[in-house]
Amino acid sequence: MDFTLSEQQQAIGELAATILTDTVPPEVLRHLEAGSDHLAVAAWQALARADLVGLAVPEADGGAGLGVFDAGLVAEQVGRHVALVPYWPTVAAATTLARWAPADLKGRLLPAAIAGDGPLTVALWEPGTTGVSGRPAVTATTDGDGWRLDGVKQPVPWAGHAAAIVVPATVGEADVALFAVAPGTPGVTAVAEATISREPFHTVTFDGARVGADALVAAPGGGDAEAALADLARTTTALLCATALGVMEGALALTATHVSERHQFGSPIGTFQAVAQRSADGYIDTEAVRLTSWSAAWRLDAGLPADDELAVAAYWASEGGQRVVHTAQHLHGGIGVDTDYPVHRYFRWAKVLELLVGGASGSLVRLGTSLAAGAPAPA
């Protein structure tokens, strides 16, 4: 399998890298982290002006008509620059709306999302759990010509900035439905949570929140909503793994520079065998995430089964990601814990991303369950 990037894909990654290098240097990130609004507005608007937010949205809906793989190239750069922008949740929500939502709902939300004026987000996690949940705790019941939503979602990324949250809900005993809910809807409360990555996350409570039928992305019954939810979960996981790849690349690049410039006993510490070996292991882990993430994203775009590949990518993003950022901290010595130096951000981001994709153990459980289900029955 050849994952050599095309000229167009190389240009996408280079453009995103240039934009983020210019708009979110470490001093800008320090200022954002110290303030009350963490959104890097200039970076977000620049990504939108460059048509990078709508990469995976079909041309008929105002996007570029490319795929998750291509959007992942931008997510990779977001991670590499630890940029405080709502890229992966907006792309995941927008692609799901484009594939499943009725035309009027798409018309209300997608143009603003692609233009950077109305970010979107997804509510795929449940309180006290890690990884995407397949059984939504929020319930939806019919209420006249609309719906009533009850329950809690946590964490919900960038909910305070989002024009709409794509919310899966359980209907009856076994059905599900997807809704696009504005955070300001009566009965919806978003409480900001402190996170180690400094990205905005919220606990969102639905307490008798009433939404009209025009908020329905995918209706219960017939299997469409189940397929839409699975589609949203897969796209989200693929983009999270691409972001984790960028985080690992950024941590490794900083570490490579440091061990080349830091001298002990008259030599760069990077020439010491133990340091060189740990750096090499970090490179191998990073390339493992690259291979598994791109493989999963390619299969998604090709319409092929990708659940097992996503579980493998999530495992490497979790396990390999933690090894890389721990190595980065260790090899930086004392300055690795100085928050004036940028390496700490990669450690923080890697931990949050690990939890969002379900962690190494959770990923192996999903993979093992899938393999067991497909194994031949014992004789």
Image (tube, rainbow, N blue to C red):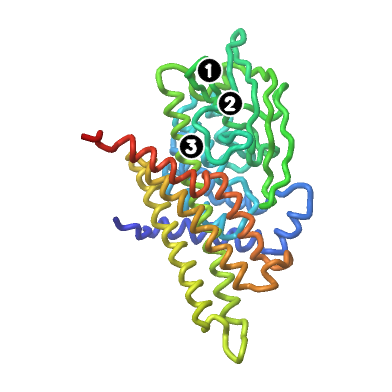
The answer to whether 249 is drawn above or below residue 151 in the figure is below
Could you say which disc has been placed on residue 233 in the image? 3
CA distance for labels 2 and 3:
15 Å
| Residue drawn at 50 percent across, 22 percent down | 176
Q: Earlier in the sequence, mark 1 or mark 3?
A: 1
Going 51% across and 52% down the picture, which residue do you hit? 318
Q: SS at mark 1?
A: strand
129 or 353, which lies in front?
Answer: 129
Residue 181 percent location from the top left of the image:
62, 27
| Cα separation between marks 1 and 3 | 18 Å
Q: Dot 3 lies on which element?
A: helix
Disc 2 is placed on an element classified as loop
Q: Quadrant of residue 148?
A: top right
Question: Please, is residue 71 above or below residue 322 in the view?
Answer: above
Give me the C-alpha separation between circle 2 and circle 1.
10 Å
Q: Position of residue 265 (x, y in %)?
A: 61, 90
Q: Is 254 rendered above or below residue 262?
A: above
Q: What amino acid is found at the position of numbered circle 1 in the picture?
A: Val
Q: Dot 2: within a 10 Å radius of its alpha carbon, few (fewer than 14), some, or many (20 or more) residues?
A: some
Q: Which residue is mark 1?
A: 171
